[in-house]
Image (spheres, grey):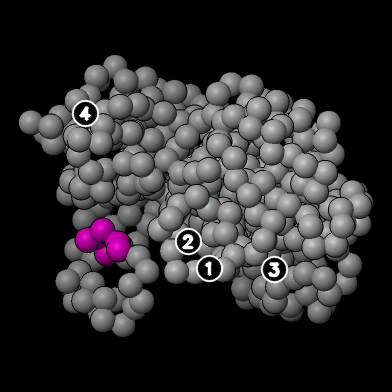
Amino acid sequence: LGPSTAWLREKERRYGAANYAPLPAVFQRGEGVWLWDTDGRRYLDMMSAYSAVSFGHSHPRLVQALTEQAQRLALTSRAFSSDRLPVFLERLCATFGYERALPVNTGLEAVETALKAARKWGYQVKGIAPGKARIIACDGNFHGRSIAIVGLSSNAHYRAGFGPFPPGLERIPFGDADALEAAITPDTAAFLVEPIQGEGGIVVPPAGYLSRCAEICRRHKVLLIADEVQTGLGRTGRLLACDHEGVRADGLILGKALGGGLLPVSAFLADRALMDVFGPGDHGSTFGGNPLAAAVGTEVLALLEQLRPWERAERLGTHLVQSLRAADLPGVRAIRGRGLLVGVAFEPNFADAGAIAERLLAHAIATRDTNGNVLRLAPPLIIDEETLEQAITTIVTTLRAFAA
Ligand code: PMP
């Protein structure tokens, strides 16, 4: 076994910035749905690194794609192309049904890419006066941590101390299509939305919301931009969460699971009418679309097509929600979500979801709380029935014991 958990935690505390507060476990190995800590203890991953580990830890095919590529060619920057990038771009466009894809690395970079595209489209195509293009987002959103993006946030904690923020960023209530219609002006370039809010507390909007938003956007010539960084690639029981309502966004933002849980891979997808606003030098990143990312991303999309993980996510997610609801747990306000993106929302006076996550960790289930006193349950989509059943039993027992 490696160095002790306490020793490692102390080192991290001593030398790291304090911008996270990890739970006490220190992991050193992962395989499939399992994580092992430095004492060799095994945990079920119900967190999936905020939904990034959809195919499980170190999927053999993805590890193979990564290591083979690392031995051949890892980085050229976009000053040159590689033999991997065109294949990845074609597959991205084919899988999600868009004409163009722009690869970057993290979720926030793909969101920034979308916002920049929308602003420029607003000036070049819609004819918005220079400097006036507005972007509308939703209360409770999470799109990342850059200054522009936290400028869109309604979370005071995410914003505090980081202003001033760029102008032209606005918010409306999530789930209220009338509010969108009321907020749109001739200067509105885009509406940015998570089809299901993840970090906001696993919030599913009312049925019909997204399709109404799409209709409103179309009528007002406003771009609908879907942030599917967390919900995409099968997590919610469809390839995309937008598919639940048959909505095709004008701009699609992908990340997290696109990198197969091995490395950061994200992308912004759109048709030419929008993507053509970018010319050489307008936008980019040294690592975006690098050969490693392209090789792994391509293999992720191949796995996706082969495994169709949204089918399992839909079936097991429905079972998870129904089982937890049937257990009639004390102190629980709601069990919500779609597919394997599930949240257990607690009564405010019952308990702190963070404390419950800590208790679950002691019972070998690794997950965290999220916004609004919600416990997140989001295992890798490859989880099997028996493992999920055992997890449900542990969760129910732990929550009952917590209440007692
Ligand atoms: N958008 C959504 C919907 C997310 O959930 C996240 C991450 N939680 C992001 C964007 C930002 O992704 P990243 O952490 O890779 O920047």
x and y percentages locating residue 176 in the rendered image: 59, 29
**How far is disc 4 from disc 1 in space, using C-alphas?**
37 Å
Q: What crowding class fits label 4: few (fewer than 14 Cα within 10 Å), some (14-19), or many (20 or more)? A: some
* Amino acid type, callout 3: Gly
* Amino acid type, callout 2: Arg
x and y percentages locating residue 45 in the rendered image: 35, 48
Asked if the residues shown at circle 2 and circle 1 are in contact, with their CB atoms under 8 angstroms apart, the answer is yes
Kindly tell me whether mark 3's CB lies below 8 Å from ligand 1. Answer: no
The mark lying in front, picked from 4 and 3, is 4
The mark lying in front, picked from 4 and 1, is 1
**Residue that badge 2 annotates:** 159
**Which segment is the magenta one?**
21-26
Instruction: Based on the picture, tell me whether residue 209 belongs to the magenta stretch.
Output: no
Residue at horizontal 69 percent and vertical 56 percent from the top: 168
* Amino acid type, callout 1: Gly
- Residue 363, quarter of the rendered image: top left
Q: N-terminal of the two: label 3 or label 1?
A: 1
**How far is disc 2 from disc 4 in space, using C-alphas?**
31 Å
Q: What crowding class fits label 3: few (fewer than 14 Cα within 10 Å), some (14-19), or many (20 or more)? A: many
Q: Quadrant of the N terminus?
A: bottom left
The mark lying in front, picked from 2 and 3, is 2
**How far is disc 4 from disc 3 in space, using C-alphas?**
45 Å
Q: Nearer the viewer, residue 34 or 240?
A: 240
x and y percentages locating residue 213 in the rendered image: 70, 31
- Residue 242, quarter of the rendered image: top right
**Residue that badge 4 annotates:** 331
Asked if the residues shown at circle 3 and circle 1 are in contact, with their CB atoms under 8 angstroms apart, the answer is no
Q: Secondary structure at mark 4?
A: loop
Q: Secondary structure at mark 3?
A: loop
Q: N-terminal of the two: label 4 or label 1?
A: 1
